[in-house]
Image (tube, rainbow, N blue to C red):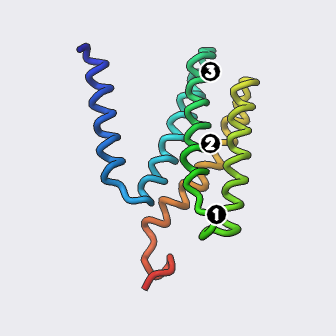
Amino acid sequence: MNSRRGAGAYARIGVESAVMSADPHQLIVMLFDGVQAAIASARLHMQDGNRAAKGASISKAIDIVNNGLAAALDHEKGGDIAANLGQLYDYVARLLLQANLRDDMAALDQAASLLDNIGSGWRELRQAPVEMVGGV
């Protein structure tokens, strides 16, 4: 086993362990981190002109948005907030698709910015005192 493959396997085990021990809130934050990493990778590949790698990174980002973030929405309990987030995730997925089809860096940056705003809210929610989030 070469060192790159070994490092990759080690990283996958670390991610799998983190996922297995994460609570639902942490899983959502991990999805936001993953989509931002995929977008950053796509940005680099777009700048380098590596269309295949750019496409793979954007596809990964779209998959995280559609099959991770959007799929995690609880429309029954979330009401208008879940509906609005669902529409926003749909818009972000369309931005990512546009970025891929047109090598549109502005669309990629807009998607990253929107996701960063929402992800920041999730991170802050984790740090908020219980009283602020409807607890005790």
Task: Name the residue located 62 percent from the left edge and 23 percent from the top edge.
Answer: 55
Report the amino acid beneath label 3: Gln
Tell whether label 3 touches label 1 (CB within 8 Å): no
Query: Which quadrant does the N terminus fall into?
Result: top left
Label 2 – label 3 distance at C-alpha:
16 Å
The residue under the point 70% across, 68% down is 80
Q: Which residue shows up at 45% across the image and 71% down it? A: 128
Q: Say whether marks 2 and 3 touch (CB < 8 Å).
A: no
Q: Quadrant of residue 110?
A: top right
Label located before the other in sequence (1 or 3): 3
Q: Which mark is residue 114?
A: none
Residue nearest the observer in this picture, 40 or 35: 35
* Vertical side of 44 occupied by 136: above or below: below
10 Å neighbourhood of mark 3: few (<14), some, or many (≥20)?
few
Please state which amino acid type lies under the numbered disc 2: Ala
Residue type, numbered disc 1:
His
Mark 1 or 3: in front is: 1
Instruction: Tell which tag, 2 or 3, sits nearer the viewer.
Output: 2
Residue beneath disc 1: 75
Q: Which residue is mark 3?
A: 47
Q: Position of residue 53 (x, y in %)?
A: 56, 19
**What is the distance, in whole Å, between disc 1 and disc 3 at their CAs?**
38 Å
Dot 2: what SS?
Answer: helix
For disc 2, the marked residue is 112
| Residue found at x 50% / y 36% | 37
Circle 1 SS class = helix
Whether residue 71 is situated above or below residue 49 in the rendered picture: below
Q: Earlier in the sequence, mark 1 or mark 2?
A: 1
